[in-house]
Amino acid sequence: MEIDQFLNFIGAILGGGIIGAIISALATIFYGERRVDTLRRRREHSIKLNDEVFKRWLEKVGDYSKIDVAYSKDIGKIVGVEPKDPTDLEFFDVAKSHLESKYPYILKEWEELKHVTLEHNKELAILLEEIRTLTIKELKMPCYYSSLPGRAPEEHITLNRFVECIYKEMEYRVRAEREWLFEKPIIQPVIYGGEKFYELAWGSYRLVKSRDEKEVGRAILLISQLIETPKFKEEVKNLMKEEDEIYKIKRENFERKIKDLIKSVELGGILKGKCRFCP
C-alpha cells in the first residue's frame, strides 16, 4: 500500500481534528521521516486547496452559474449571461489540475451545469427582449440602462429594470399565486432642480421619469398589459419548469460531488492527482 493510500485510509477511519499526530506517528513507523515529510506537505497542500478553492467555489456556485440576462450595447439587445469558471479564486487552475487527472466526473458535472444555465439564460433573454421591444414601441421614451455607464436623461425609462421587474412579477404570480411582489406601481410627483416631474415607483425602483403625468400612467397600464399577456404567461411557466426540473437538478448533482470531495479532505484525506505545486 502506498503512503498516501495508507494515510487516506487511516484518516477516513479516525476522522478530522486531532488525527494529525496519530497519522504522523503511524506513517513514520511504516515509511520513515522523508516520506512522512512529503506526506505532511501534500496534506497541507490538500487543506489549502480545499479551503481556498473547493469550499469557496461551492459557496459561490450560484454566482458562477447564475440565471441572468444583460443588455448588450454592442449587439443592441438583451442576451443570456454566460456562466464562468471561478477564475477569481487564486488557486483555481491548480485545483483544476487535480480534478482533470483524478476527479474528471466533478468537472463533467460542472460543464453540464454551465451548459444548461447558458441555454436557460438564452431562452430567458428571448422573452425579455420581446418585452423590451414592445415597451419601446408603446412608450416611445428615451431609454436608459442602469447596467451601462453614463447618466440618465432628464426624462427616461430605465428599461432593463422595467423589463426585469415585469418578469419577476410574473414569476411571483406563478409561484405565490398572489399579486405585486414589489407592491403596486404608483405615480409619485417629485421636484428636481426646481422643476416638477412624475416618477413611476415600483417598490424601491424608480423606473420612469417624465414631466408628463399621463406618460407615466401609460407605463403603469403597460405593465399590467404585459403581465397579463397569455403568450408571456405561458413562456414564464415553461422557463420556471425548466429551472426546477433541469437547472436545479444539475446544480444539486455538482454540489453533491464537490461536497463529497471537501468532506474527504476534512476527514484527513489527501487530494489525488498532481499539480505544479505538489510535493
Image (cartoon, rainbow, N blue to C red):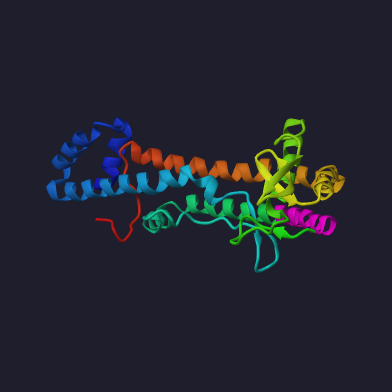
Answer whether residue 129 is magenta in the image: yes
Residue 154 in which image quadrant: bottom right
Residue 252 lies, in percent from the top left, at 56, 41
Q: Which quarter of the rendered picture does the C terminus lie within?
A: bottom left
Q: Which quarter of the rendered picture does the N terminus lie within?
A: top left
261 relative to 119, above or below: above
Image side of residue 229 versus residue 272, left or right: right
Q: Magenta part of the protein: which range?
A: 123-140
- Viewer-side residue, 193 vs 258: 193
Residue 276 lies, in percent from the top left, at 31, 61
Tell me which residue sits at (23%, 49%) in the image: 41
Residue 241 seen in this snapshot: no
Tell me which residue sits at (69%, 53%) in the image: 160
- Viewer-side residue, 92 vs 89: 89
Image side of residue 114 versus residue 30, left or right: right
Name the main secondary structure of what is drawn in magenta. helix
- Viewer-side residue, 35 vs 215: 215
